[in-house]
Image (cartoon, coloured by chain):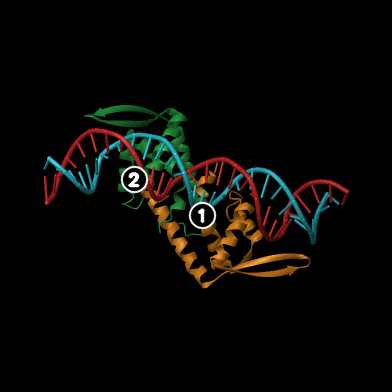
Chain colours: A green, B orange, C red, D cyan
DNA sequence: CTTAATACATAAGAGACCAATGTATTAGGG
DNA sequence: CCCTAATACATTGGTCTCTTATGTATTAAG
């Protein structure tokens, strides 16, 4: 019942913000961090995550670095400079969105 | 750059909440009220609005009443009892969503 | 008389995500 | 030892929601 439709459009913002805070992360780590921060409520699917990461990389907002741990390969992502700007922009957009929704839905701002 | 993607999934909530507050409204009135409440930032397109109204009606959350004003026909929508429950539910979902996003994005709750 | 606003509506398509599936390594319990 | 769960990457097909474009018709204003 935590409607999944509301999450649409938030994934890029989440990824960029986490990377802005953490410096670098790999895909699986992102899914776990989101799960942790949301108290288990928000579960990123790989079918959403990886295509988005690849898209952000193609747009030069992220760069990758492969690190081999034993026989397992991890792919770390970090923000480019453009990515850092984009992260800040997306966060602004999101807070504006929330404020607008508060007005439209007439929710007590204290909430 | 108020990203349109973030609005996905909010339309039903908005419609139900406005009807819960106003009692009854017609389609065009809803677009104007949203525009007014958002300070012109949020513009509902008819291609989104009418199919959604029809869908909510098909789900028995809304009932309609046609009113003729001169030669122009207005179609008023109001909530059924199920619609009132649904409106409250959607509002809960939305506030939960915002709280979850605050945690995930680590936004100052005061914001 | 032409444009903008009011008022309804549908159809084609795009965008973002989910579910399912696939490969492969590692750790733990029985 | 073997099976399962967790770790770690990735792609494909389908769904849902909205946007763009289009259509009809009335009314008000310049």
Q: Nearer the viewer, residue B51 or C2?
A: B51
Please state if A79 lies on the left or on the right of B45 as rendered.
left
Q: Quadrant of residue B75?
A: bottom right
Secondary structure of residue under mark 1: loop
Seen in the picture, residue B79 relative to B37 is either above or below; the reply is below
Give me the chain letter of mark 1.
B
User: How far apart in space, not on screen, are marks 1 and 2 (Cα)?
Assistant: 22 Å
Q: Are marks 1 and 2 on the same chain?
A: no
Residue B58 in percent (x, y) is at 56, 65
In the displayed structure, does residue B50 sit left or right of residue B88?
right
| Label number found at residue A3 | none
Q: Quadrant of residue A61?
A: top left
Q: Which residue is mark 1?
A: B10
Q: Please indicate whether residue B107 sits to the left or right of residue C5 in the image.
A: left
Mark 1 residue crowding within 10 angstroms, few (<14) / some (14–19) / many (20+) = some
Of residues A13 and B36, the one nearer the viewer is: A13
Query: Quick check: marks 1 and 2 in contact, CB under 8 Å?
Result: no
Q: Which mark is residue A34?
A: 2
Please name the residue shown 60% across and 53% down the image: B48
SS for tag 2? helix
The answer, for residue B84, to whether it is visible in the render is yes
Dividing the image into 4 quarters, which one contains the N terminus of chain B? top right
Dot 2: chain letter: A
Q: Position of residue A35 (x, y in %)?
A: 32, 47
Q: Does C5 appear above or below C26? A: below
In the figure, is residue B2 to the left or right of A51?
right
Q: Residues within 10 Å of mark 2 (few under 14, many from 20)?
A: many
User: Where residue D27 sits: x, y (%)?
Assistant: 80, 61
| Residue B3 screen position, x and y as percent | 53, 43
> Residue at coordinates 60% horizontally, 57% vertically from top-left?
B51
Q: Is residue B44 visible?
A: no
């Amino acid at each position: 019942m935590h409607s999944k439709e509301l999450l649409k459009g938030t994934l890029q913002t989440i990824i960029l913000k986490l990377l802005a805070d953490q410096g670098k992360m790999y895909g699986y780590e992102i899914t776990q961090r989101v799960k942790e921060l949301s108290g288990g409520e928000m579960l990123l699917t790989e079918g959403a995550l990886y295509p988005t990461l690849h898209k952000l990389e193609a747009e030069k907002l992220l760069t990758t670095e492969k690190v081999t741990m034993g026989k397992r390969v991890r792919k770390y992502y970090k923000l480019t400079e453009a990515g850092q700007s984009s992260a800040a922009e997306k966060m602004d957009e999101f807070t504006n969105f929330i404020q607008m929704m508060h007005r439209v839905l007439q929710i007590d701002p204290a909430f």
